[in-house]
Image (tube, grey):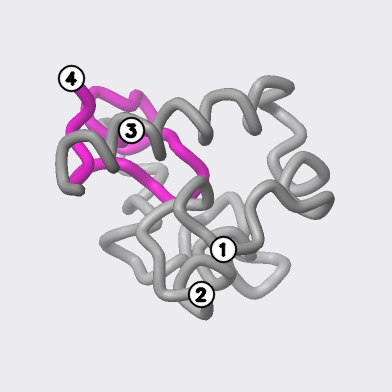
Amino acid sequence: MTDFDALTPCGECCVGCPKKASGFCAGCLESGGNCREWQESGGCPIFYCTERHGVPFCGLCEEFPCEWLPKKVSWNPHILTEQTALATEYRKRYG
């Protein structure tokens, strides 16, 4: 079962993340999208996009799926499938 309180906008879970545990990353949820990995570009664009759309993660956005997301989340080739599954689980649980 997914812990939606620990789920990042891109679908990652900070619980048990080695970058967060080591102090390298404060976590995008806790830092308001200002995590170190996106520091040079002014913050996490995925975080800011979900914030603008008023959703906790991409799969719940009215514009999902968009062409922009797979380009920004290049480390996860399954981002659209995973976000779809997360949205389905979320809607089943919370209506």
Depth check, mark 3 against mark 4: the one in front is: 4
Q: Is 81 drawn above or below residue 26 in the view shown? A: above
SS label for mark 2? helix
SS label for mark 4? loop
Q: Earlier in the sequence, mark 2 or mark 3?
A: 3
Q: Which mark is residue 53?
A: 2
- Amino acid on which disc 4 is placed: Met
Q: CA distance from mark 2 to mark 1?
A: 8 Å
Q: Earlier in the sequence, mark 4 or mark 2?
A: 4
Q: Position of residue 64 (x, y in %)?
A: 63, 52
- Residue at image x 45%, y 26%? 85
> Residue at label 3?
13
SS label for mark 1? loop
- Amino acid on which disc 3 is placed: Cys
**Which of 31/61 is in front?**
61
Q: Earlier in the sequence, mark 2 or mark 1?
A: 2
Q: CA distance from mark 1 to mark 3?
A: 22 Å
> Residue at label 4?
1
Q: Is 83 drawn above or below residue 49 in the view shown? A: above
The stretch of residues the image draws in magenta is 1-20
Depth check, mark 2 against mark 3: the one in front is: 2
Q: Position of residue 23 (x, y in %)?
A: 30, 42
- Amino acid on which disc 1 is placed: Glu
Residue 7 appears left or right of 82 = left
- Residue at image x 70%, y 28%? 75
Q: CA distance from mark 3 to mark 4?
A: 12 Å
> Residue at label 1?
62
- Amino acid on which disc 2 is placed: His
